[in-house]
Image (cartoon, rainbow, N blue to C red):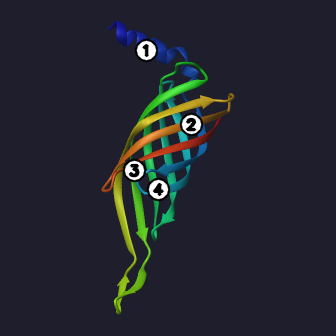
Amino acid sequence: MIVVAAMMATMSAKAQDAGKFAVGVNGTYSFKTESFAPGLKFQYSILRNLRVELAGDLWSKKDLTKSVDVFFNIHLLLHPSEVFKVYPLLGIGYINTKTDSSEYTIDGVHVFNPEKSRDNVMGNAGLGIQINASKHVAFSVEGKYQFKDDSQFCSSLGLIYIF
């Protein structure tokens, strides 16, 4: 009961953090596909220690393949200081991957590969750090593992504007 009381006191001590809305941009890199994705994110602080995020990325074309993803994450915010926040994240998302058609000839045989499109549900699990540069501007660094049919580890750098 003492632990629960301490948690409640911590969460209510800075209740004014709840209700904050933020918009950000980020750049994400996949170590598996060696590709880059610019993205957007929208965040809302439900409580001082709990934030939800809706985000999406547009992956650059690599080997005739390009992707777009959208996901919903939950961040559990830990506040070592008012400038520095650490957060584990957990989420679920959707990814669409398209491979362009291709034609080539091998040993006089013409080969045609039609365009392919795949839709997948994915999960995210990772860790992030937010550094507040001012009352309205923050930077973020995240590392997350994306669970899908061909899972991958991604890292991202972001710039956030807090309203």
Give amino acid for label 4.
Glu
In this view, the residue farthest toward the bottom is 108
Q: Residue at x 34, y 58 (%)?
A: 120
Q: State which tag comes first along the sequence, 2 or 4.
A: 4
Question: Regarding mark 4 in the picture, which secondary structure is present there?
Answer: loop
Q: CA distance from mark 1 to mark 2?
A: 27 Å
Residue 32 place in picture, x, y as percent: 40, 53
Q: Marks 1/4: CA distance?
A: 43 Å
Q: Which mark is residue 140?
A: 2
Give the side of residue 5 with respect to residue 39, left or right.
Answer: left
Q: Gap in Å between the C-alphas at discs 3 and 1?
A: 31 Å
Q: CA distance from mark 2 to mark 4?
A: 21 Å
Instruction: State how far apart marks 3 and 4 are (Cα).
Output: 21 Å
| Circle nearer the viewer, 1 or 4 | 4
Amino acid under label 3?
Answer: Gly
Q: Amino acid at mark 1?
A: Met
Q: Disc 2 to disc 3, how far (Cα)?
A: 20 Å
Disc 3 target residue: 93
Q: Nearer the viewer, mark 2 or mark 3?
A: 2
Quadrant (top left/top right/bottom left/bottom right) for the N terminus? top left
Residue toward you, 26 or 111: 111
Q: Residues within 10 Å of mark 3 (few under 14, many from 20)?
A: many
The residue that label 1 is drawn on is 8
